[in-house]
Amino acid sequence: MTSRSTEYESYALLSNDERESFEFEYEGDNSSGAHKQARSARPRSQDRCAALPWVFALLVVVAAADGITLLYMSRIMNTVYADLSTDELEFANPYHGLDALYHSGTIDSSKIDPIQNIPRVVAQIFPGRPKELAPVGEHDLFNKAFGTLSPHEKHLQVSPSVHTIAQFRALDFGMEDCSLVIQLPGNGDRIESKEPFLFHPLSALDVFRLDAPKPLDVRKLSYTTRPPRKEKIATVTPRAGGETPVTRFPCVWGSLHTFEVACSSASDCLVDIWSSQNTTYGIYMYQHQTV
């Protein structure tokens, strides 16, 4: 407050000429400061405008690098770490020369009893729910020490609402005459599974051959995606306590054979049985010697 009053008093004591000179100098100082600020502000704005293209170019380079990295990672996942199917691989022949040897007549083969062939795939599909996938791992167990354990169990279930698909691979050379059978337990037979055996004695089953030249993928199998039917091969009425023959057919080693079992249209059938490692129930085939 004291400094301002002192400046005012000093200004008042000046003459008119001195006042004009003072005001001119004051305005000059102000104008020179404004020019300095304008000159200093102009280069800053110019620098910012000049930097914008470089910033944009840097963003483009970073985005392009990220895109190339993602494409490269996607290529690695689809090639190096791809879940490749073995369906297209050739089934290697481990029996080189045996066919020519036995057909030459210089050697006689040993007599071999029929070999029981368990299906590699048994799965249920549902006509009333055509897009529902077949159950997988119904009896799998989890163990903290060993992880998931899959018991060697096969399930034959046939009813008006459930069909069963079974796929076999004939593996043995010289055992290339196959017979398809259905076996059910009788009274007093041991059933290792915890599931009960359900059976209607008058059940009539239709068995179809399916057109499936490749191994079935149960994870994608449903009534809609099942292989097309080639032919109906039999209608059978299975009996409890024994084997029921279905059909007999040639089965070259390495070949796949796929069947669908359904209720006959004139039968309100029911068959539900689980097999285990030690009991063979359900659908399977025998391979008979041909050399």
Image (cartoon, grey):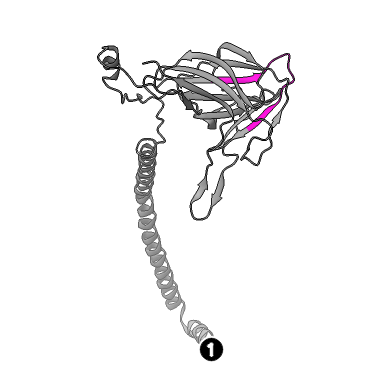
Nearer to us in this view, 58 or 261: 261
Figure disc tally: 1
Residue 54 relative to residue 133: left or right: left
The quarter of the image holding the C terminus is: top left
Name above or below for residue 229 compared with residue 29: above
Q: Residues within 10 Å of mark 1 (few under 14, many from 20)?
A: few
Highlighted magenta segment, given as a residue range: 259-273
Nearer to us in this view, 12 or 260: 260
Give residue 287's quadrant in the image: top left
Query: Where does the image place residue 224, in percent across and percent down from the top left?
Result: 60, 22
- Magenta run includes residue 235: no
Give residue 231's quadrant in the image: top right
The quarter of the image holding the N terminus is: bottom right
Q: Residue at x 66, y 30 (%)?
A: 186
Name above or below for residue 19 compared with residue 215: below
Query: Where does the image place residue 235, in percent across and percent down from the top left?
Result: 64, 13
